[in-house]
Image: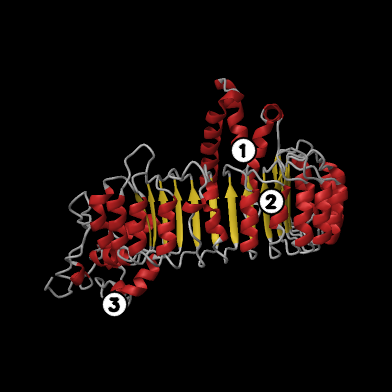
Amino acid sequence: MGQSASTASAKPLFSSSSSRAAKPPHSFASSSGGSANRQPAAMTEGDAASPISGASPDRDHTLDLPDECLGLVFQFLGAGDRKRCSLVCWRWFAVEGQSRHRLSLDARAALLGAAPAIFARFDAVSKLALKCDRRADSIGDEAIALIAVRCPNLTRLKLRACRAVTDAGMASFAKHCPGLRKLSVGLCTFGASGIEAVVRGCALLEELSIKRLRGLPDTFATGGAVIGAASLRSMCLKELYNGQCFAPLIAGSPNIRTLRLIRCTGDWDRPLKDIADKVPGIIEVHLEKLQVSDRGLAVLSSCNNLEILHLVKTPECTDAGLATVAERCHRLRKVHIDGWKTNRIGDEGLMVVARQCSNLQELVLIGVNPTARSLGLIASNCRNLERLALCSSDTFGDAEITCIASKCMSLKKLCIKGCPVSDQGMEALAEGCPKLVKVKVKKCRGVTPGCADWLMARRVGMLAVNLDVIGPTKQQEASMSGSRILENNEQLIDQIGAVDLLPSSSNSRLSPWMNRMGFSTGGNLVISALRRWSRGSTNSNST
């Protein structure tokens, strides 16, 4: 430690005479004070053979960089590259740890013993993810309290399957991390009291996501409800047995702008009324597989600033409810509707949207059967429509796509999946939609590869066409598993903005193999796993 920084005194972490690299210790608190004066590993003979003119061959120019600048360089690297850089020398090891702000750890019970050394090195962590395997013993209250003490500057925390953490542990965490801004919990066993402790103790909390929380009461009791928070901006409840116990929290947070309710049990019409009355400034609402009817949509229509509406598999919502929202929420920009093939939302509701919501920019219709009546009105009145997706529609054919091509002057991206369109209808896109830059066509039997090539040639390279053709084997499989098309459309919703649809090569390679192995539609779990594996391989090969 007392030696001066010179070539003779520099101690590299790697030795050329040994096949194993000496790894830095997990905790360097005792030696970090002199680590900045240590010189990195000496240059190899190959480097010395061609030195920079006027510079010493053994000179390490990274020593001229302050630690802060070196840390900024590390922030542009991925996790793997950062780990490799930390093994170069003691200085890089120290700087890499001190400049790391995001950390993801295996939250098994053994983390309790390793936490002091880990957070002695990574003492600037502000975003932490603790994930445990569901079959393993997770960390408990003692570990979560220790982490909170070691990381007082945490702004984001994600807990997954930390079943040993209780309400008391969350209260202790909130006491030591008052600056927390985002909390996401899933598959944990603490209850509403733990969430309330975080809401009370973290005055800056802005985003709260709760998924599969196991410690909620069986019945809704107003007395045990979680209080509101003025700082909350976004709230997501997903797959909760009694999610209504958090309705007072939402209603008591007047500044919430985004509300997502996904697959939560119970009737939500009454809670939505209380929420809409007390939080009129909501901008985005996402309702998925929820027991909500037109009455719930009617109370949401009082949120005049609503811009984004997702109605996904809510069979009790009809044209009347959608019309009520459209008539009072004229600022709607994005509308996503998954009708679940119930035919309760169609032309009538969409025509009201067309008349009342002229600022519409994005429209996604899944399992809905619109015709040229509503689509023509949308194309004529919604001049800013840029993104349109239609999936699993029995009525969207050549006439409808011709109507879109002739009237949607601002359309940039068009996605069609599982619809009865043909080459004849696709040809209308050669002259229409002058701003169109991307077309995705998937599982449309009437569209051939030749049409896609012709369309791109006619648009003189200004249009990208992503076509997934269904062969005879795929047609038979599609007819046997039509319900899976609706489930897969959720992925298309996420991809409409920027990511291309998955190529057909992955699916087409699997189908003959599955037939030879004797898989049937009863083995959906095995088939879906194989598809995910194949798609992952295809994506990795293409990058």
Characterize the local packing of mark 2: few (<14), some (14-19) or many (20 or more) Cα atoms within 10 angstroms: many
Question: Nearer the N terminus, badge 2 or badge 3?
Answer: 3
Q: How is the image coloured?
A: secondary structure
Residue closest to the far bottom: 54
Label 2, label 3: how far apart the Cα atoms are? 74 Å
Q: Secondary structure at mark 2?
A: helix
> How far from the left and from the top, in percent, is residue 330?
76, 63
> How far from the left and from the top, in percent, is residue 459?
78, 56
Q: Name the mark nearer the viewer: 2 or 3.
A: 2
Q: Which amino acid type is shown beneath numbered disc 2? A: Gly
Nearer to the camera, 118 or 18 = 118
Nearer to the camera, 403 or 281 = 281
Residue wearing tag 2: 296
Q: What is the number of the mark on residue 505?
A: 1
Instruction: Say if residue 55 shows up in the picture.
Output: yes
Q: Secondary structure at mark 1?
A: helix
> How far from the left and from the top, in percent, is residue 528?
55, 33
Q: Is residue 398 above or below residue 36?
A: above
Label 1, label 3: how far apart the Cα atoms are? 54 Å
Query: In the shown orientation, is residue 461 left or right of residue 226?
Result: right
Q: Name the mark nearer the viewer: 2 or 1.
A: 2
Instruction: Say if residue 155 shows up in the picture.
Output: no
Q: Please tell me how many numbered marks the rendered image carries.
A: 3
Q: Name the mark nearer the viewer: 1 or 3.
A: 1
Q: Quadrant of residue 46?
A: bottom left
Question: Nearer the N terminus, badge 1 or badge 3?
Answer: 3
Q: Which amino acid type is shown beneath numbered disc 1? A: Ser
Nearer to the camera, 362 or 247 = 247
Residue closest to the far front: 223
Residue wearing tag 3: 55
Question: Nearer the N terminus, badge 2 or badge 1?
Answer: 2
Characterize the local packing of mark 3: few (<14), some (14-19) or many (20 or more) Cα atoms within 10 angstroms: few
